Image (cartoon, helix red, strand yellow):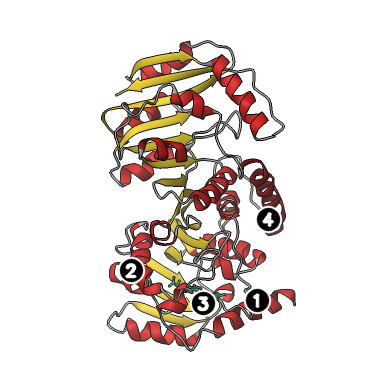
Amino acid sequence: MAAEVRRDNFKSFWDKYAGQPNTNSMMLNNNADELEELDRADILASLPILTNKEVVDIGAGIGRFTTVLAETAKWVMSTDFIESFVSRNRERNAHLGNINYQVGDAVNLKMNDTSVDLVFTNWLMMYLSDSETVEFIHNCMRWLRPYGYVHLRESCSEPSTGRTKKNTMHDDGSTNPTHYRFSSLYINLLRSIRYRDEDGKLWRFDLHWSCSVPTYIKRQNNWRQVHWLSQKVPADLGDKETSFNELLDLFSNVWKKYQLDWDAKLDNEESVWTDKIFSTILSPESVLKNSTVFVYTPRLVSPFVHVNSFLLADQFQANVWNVETVPEYYRTSLTKANTRKDQRVRFGWNENLQSSLNYWKQRDASFDLVVATELLRSTTSEELKELTTIMTPGSRILTLEPNETGDESQLRQLISDAELKITKWKDVTADAHEAQKVYFEHHKKDGKSDNLHWFLIEIRL
Ligand SMILES: C[S@@+](CC[C@H](N)C(=O)[O-])C[C@H]1O[C@@H](n2cnc3c(N)ncnc32)[C@H](O)[C@@H]1O
């Protein structure tokens, strides 16, 4: 019964817009025309190639995306629960003969197992309850063919128009039932599900990346419009099937609490203890204005070991891409980005360095500088060598490396196996401990300096 009440809630929320089957209501923004084309291009550019593929566009509205999906895909099923939106979609796309339309609730959508190559959604989960979201992700697994993709895009933590009322189409008088969930919840859900098919084979999602939608950063100063691309792949050996109840409890309770704990520790971070250490090697003469910097911060030994990308952008007028690998720290970085509003700083989440390299290699990236913490600790020599393929010739990698024993030989070996040259090597252990002490005192956090050795290393291509 409770689920039915919620469903009505969302349906009546969207029924209010049924008389306006236009771009503004699709984006719930009175100024949508300014954003629509760019936003659409951002999303479409992130999708895999769809030639000969079968696609379902769920919560498609008036078909902003259906048109372009159908232009390349073999066949598209486009569905929404508001009849006038589907009618408008049908009118707009009458010239395309490869689209089926359906009026219906995403929650009750029936499709054959392994019948599509891409499940496309853009702003849908936020209109589903937690249990419906978990069920929907299960359904995506069922509907997708092996190696098929699911695309999700959601407003995380706040509406797409931000916290101000400017341009919003949510009226003040009624409650807004939308779920503006933490970005980390979607990452955790997509990564955790293990689904057993009818043949007894176990599947998981390989989450290729989590990124902010660039247009919303540029036009709205909002880093919390986030999208994700996952691929259905065989589960790993030893993986166990996840139950619906287990995932729902994690999604509704456990991960949320975990995120809030990390928010409390990291949200008000004013500086990072590594600032001082990196400042000894990064001078304005050594970093060209408008450089592109790749920052990699897996935060293995401590959540406080990372790089202050805002400072890099500020000091060197650099454009920074900061890869986070822990969903909770990624969300705190997006929060900081929304507060600082420095558009030169962008964050992406990837499972590991290799996944981020795949992302940037597909986009032919070329970074002028890499600044990292724990890079050598978390990588192989092959990966380190591959990192150079997304860097400009002659550029350098700076990494701050913790080490339990003070033995440098393994780290040096890794760099030489990657056929790279060490150009500076400094033991910064004493400075690191002092910087940590100052950091914890300043931020009034209960933490203390570690017992690790710290090396600051410069590697040149
Ligand atoms: C913000 S609009 C986005 C529309 C479209 N995906 C786009 O990006 O232009 C959300 C759409 O999801 C639809 N929707 C919300 N909940 C739904 C559900 N449970 N089943 C089907 N459609 C739903 C709404 O009617 C609306 O068209």
In this rendering, the answer to whether 60 lies above or below 236 is below
Tag 1 near tag 4, CB within 8 Å: no
Task: Give coordinates of residue 372: x percent, y percent.
Answer: 45, 30
Q: Earlier in the sequence, mark 2 or mark 1?
A: 2
Disc 4 secondary structure class: loop
Q: Residue 243: which numbered mark, if any?
A: 4
Q: Amino acid at mark 1?
A: Thr
Disc 1 secondary structure class: loop
Q: Quadrant of the C terminus?
A: top left
User: Disc 3 designates what residue?
Assistant: 169
Gap in angstroms between the C-alphas marked 2 and 1:
29 Å
In this rendering, the answer to whether 221 lies above or below 387 is below
Does residue 142 appear in the picture of this structure? yes
Question: Quadrant of the rendered structure where residue 212 is?
Answer: bottom left
In this rendering, the answer to whether 426 lies above or below 2 is above
Q: Residue 37: which numbered mark, if any?
A: 2
Q: Residue at x 68, y 55 (%)?
A: 243
Q: Amino acid at mark 2?
A: Glu
Tag 3 near tag 4, CB within 8 Å: no
Gap in angstroms between the C-alphas marked 3 and 1:
12 Å
